[in-house]
Image (cartoon, rainbow, N blue to C red):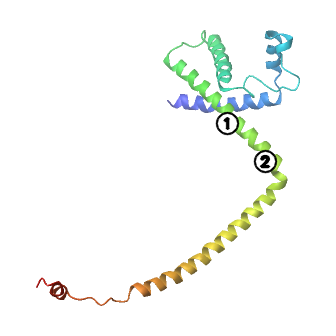
Amino acid sequence: MGLELIIFIISMLFGVLLYWRESNSNKAYRIFNKLINSKALQLKAKDKTGFVFNQKLILRIVYITFMYITILLVLQFLIPIGYTTVSIFVSSIVGTIAGTYLANVMITSSKIVEDKSDSLSDLVTTTIQKGKNMINDIAHKEANDANNIESFNSETTKPKPTRSARTRLKDKGLM
């Protein structure tokens, strides 16, 4: 189980590296696209789609699984294929897919931060100002609530004149 966890983490890092590499250049995907598709179906010049970059989940699974099966076919002569080998390859496939989605989040968030960096300082100052206003409102509200509680307590602590149970029963005519 420890080896599978290590392989999973390494394959996540491999997925991040694979996604980052394809986000910069998709030459391998373009080569396969030119070999397989006709001229009308080939990628446009501005299209940055790769094997994992800008692909749907199913196609990512297919491409990554195909890549690992190819590696497994090459390695079958070096290592025996058993439960442990299959388990390691499955965890590496899942880790690579998870790594590509992790890289997608990192790249997308870095682009958003770069786009919003100019207004980020304004956003931080307005957020801090709103926080200060909220703290002031809470402080004033607590003071007002304390005054209201004191006046409420003074009204409710006045003892009401009560009659004994014996006198109440006499008034009802039961005694």
Q: Which residue is mark 1?
A: 102
Q: Position of residue 116 (x, y in %)?
A: 81, 50
Q: Which residue is mark 2?
A: 113
The image shows residue 38, relative to residue 88, as above or below, that is: above
The image shows residue 152, relative to residue 112, as above or below, that is: below
Q: Could you say which is closer to the camera, residue 110 or residue 163?
A: 163
Q: Position of residue 145 (x, y in %)?
A: 54, 78
**Gap between marks 1 and 2 measured at Cα:** 17 Å
Q: Could you say which is closer to the camera, residue 173 or residue 39?
A: 173
Q: Secondary structure at mark 1?
A: helix
Q: Secondary structure at mark 2?
A: helix
Q: Could you say which is closer to the camera, residue 80 or residue 109?
A: 109
Residue 36 image label: none
Q: Position of residue 111 (x, y in %)?
A: 79, 42
Q: Earlier in the sequence, mark 1 or mark 2?
A: 1
Residue located 67% across and 17% down the image: 67
Residue type at mark 2 is Val
Residue located 86% across and 21% down the image: 44
**Is 91 left, or right, of 38 in this rendering?**
left
Residue located 82% across and 18% down the image: 30
Residue type at mark 1 is Leu
Circle 1 crowding by C-alpha within 10 Å: few under 14, some 14–19, many from 20: some
